Image (cartoon, rainbow, N blue to C red):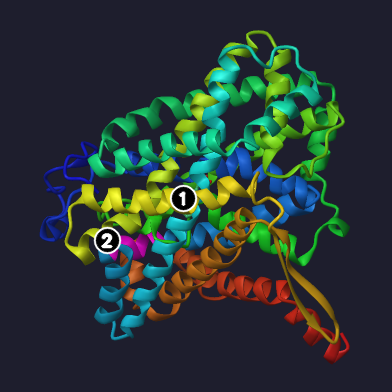
Amino acid sequence: MSDSASSISDTPNNQNPQNQSSGRELWSSRMVFILAATGSAVGLGNIWKFPYITGENGGGAFVLIYLLCIASIGIPIMMAEIMLGRRGRHDPVTTMKKLARESGHSRSWGLLGWMGVIAGFLILSYYSVIAGWAMAYIPRMASGAFQGLDAAGVNSVFTTLVSNPEVLIAWHSIFLFMTMMVVARGVRGGLEKAVTYLMPLLFVLLIILILYAIDTGHFSQGLTYLFNPDFSKITTDGVLSAMGHAFFTLSLGMGAIMVYGSYLPSKTSIAQASISVAFMDTLVALMAGMIIFPIVFANSLEPSAGPGLIFKTLPLAFGHMDYGTLFGTLFFILLVFAAWTSSISLIEPAITWGMKTFQISRTKTSIIAGIFVWLMGLLTVFSFNLTSEVTITSTISTKYGEFVILKDATAFDFLDYLTSNIMLPLGGLMIAVYAGWLMKREYSREELNISSGLYTLWSFLVRFVAPLMVVIVFLNAMGVVAFVRTIMGV
Ligand code: TRP
């Protein structure tokens, strides 16, 4: 984090001797930490990704599993990740090595940090392209291009946009440049003020959109779709996506929250902070769902339209409501802001690690990282046009059936699958195992500083529930569980 970051007090929190001895800048208050963590959590994951993967996975059952994952895996692992960060007070790689050394475990725990650095990097490469789509919608909204358009018209605006690689590259470049500027120069203080004001504003706009959704006459159909679970619609891969998304949306499993936790004053309650962040994040996602699906049904669209879903539905709302041009423009500006505060946290672990490893300045590290992410982003840009036909399908076939891991996946689908469904849960699993089994209990008890009942609950979730769920969901998606069940005849 930059030295000039105004949100982090220059003098260590002097009421706290431990902070003083660490000599590291800290967030000036718990509120600032919560804002930064919420800024990281609330982003495209909530408004763009949650609705479309819910639509791809048939609605209610997926949402229920997702909510269960947030509560039983997400919150406990978030507490664990913040705790490790605060105890280590370094970049994720160094933190994990340091903690492992402190408690006599292998330095290979640094690999966890490594995987996080790579995951953040890969996610940012496509995140920036999608944020670029949202940016591209700002001028289109402002010019009133969507006024009165029907579903086919809106669809063609989206298709025209994504079929043009030059335009996508331009917006991707602008968004990435904005992100790297903040990361390099640390105008984080300004961004946090933005979070303070813009996040509530985004919330207000979501409420306005919900009112519109109610007005479509298909609100209850949307609610039923979201909240009435139909388990026949969910596949093992859908369960994996729900779990992966719980990590993605809370920014867990790759060290982002660990880095943020490393700046957290010692006395701040980790449990309270985690619960507030998870609550706000979930609320925004559910609101987005409650807006999108009524519009989908009112216009006889397909819930499973994929990554373009919000771009094909929201303009219909803005195109038909009072002050739609104003609200629509504002909405996409705020969405870009939300994506911005998230993208910073995606690259922060890589930057802190790069600076330390190569002993180069923050600015240089940011430029180099920016160039790599930009190039990598081209894979996603081309996935929607030039190379949209270049896909891979990967199946595991056993005597007991075929298990499709990836079907007709473009480079974007592959990157998304690899990061959300594999790397983040794996990182989360390692965090849970480390925090629950290897870290001395007196340390975690001291860091978390919660009542012994709550501590027991946390420890149970982090030691047993979270790791087991991750492992079972993994094995299930790979067909291993089906395989074993068939062999054992159950
Ligand atoms: N949580 C963000 C979103 O929902 C994305 C994000 C930011 C993220 N930092 C992360 C995802 C770290 C995984 C890991 O849009």
Q: Residue at x 72, y 32 (%)?
A: 292
Mark 2 C-beta closer than 8 Å to ligand 1? no
Q: Position of residue 64 (x, y in %)?
A: 72, 53
Residue 238 x/y as whole percent: 74, 60
In depth, the one of 184 and 103 nearer the eye is: 184
Residue 302, percent across and down?
83, 39
Task: Determine the CA span between mark 1 and mark 2.
Answer: 16 Å
Most extreme residue toward the top is: 322
Main SS of the magenta segment?
helix
Report helix, strand or loop for mark 2. helix
Chain-order first, disc 1 or disc 2: 1
Is 181 above or below relative to 397?
Answer: above
Q: Is residue 85 magenta?
A: yes
Q: Quadrant of the C terminus?
A: bottom right
Furthest residue in direction bottom, as rendered: 488
Mark 1 and mark 2 in contact? Answer it, CB < 8 Å: no
Q: Position of residue 25 (x, y in %)?
A: 18, 49
Of residues 26 and 174, the one nearer the viewer is 174
Q: Which mark is residue 110?
A: none
Q: Is residue 3 visible?
A: yes
Of the residues shown, which amino acid type is indicated by label 2? Gly
Which residues make up the magenta segment? 81-87
Within 10 Å of the Cα at label 1, are there few (<14), some (14-19), or many (20+) other Cα atoms?
many
Q: Nearer the viewer, residue 449 or 130?
A: 130
Where 425 falls versus 250 (above or below)? below
Residue 487 shown left or right of residue 336 in the figure: right
Q: Check disc 1 and report the residue beneath it.
A: 124
Residue flagged by tag 1: what amino acid is it? Leu
The quarter holding residue 479 reads bottom right
The circle drawn on residue 354 is 2
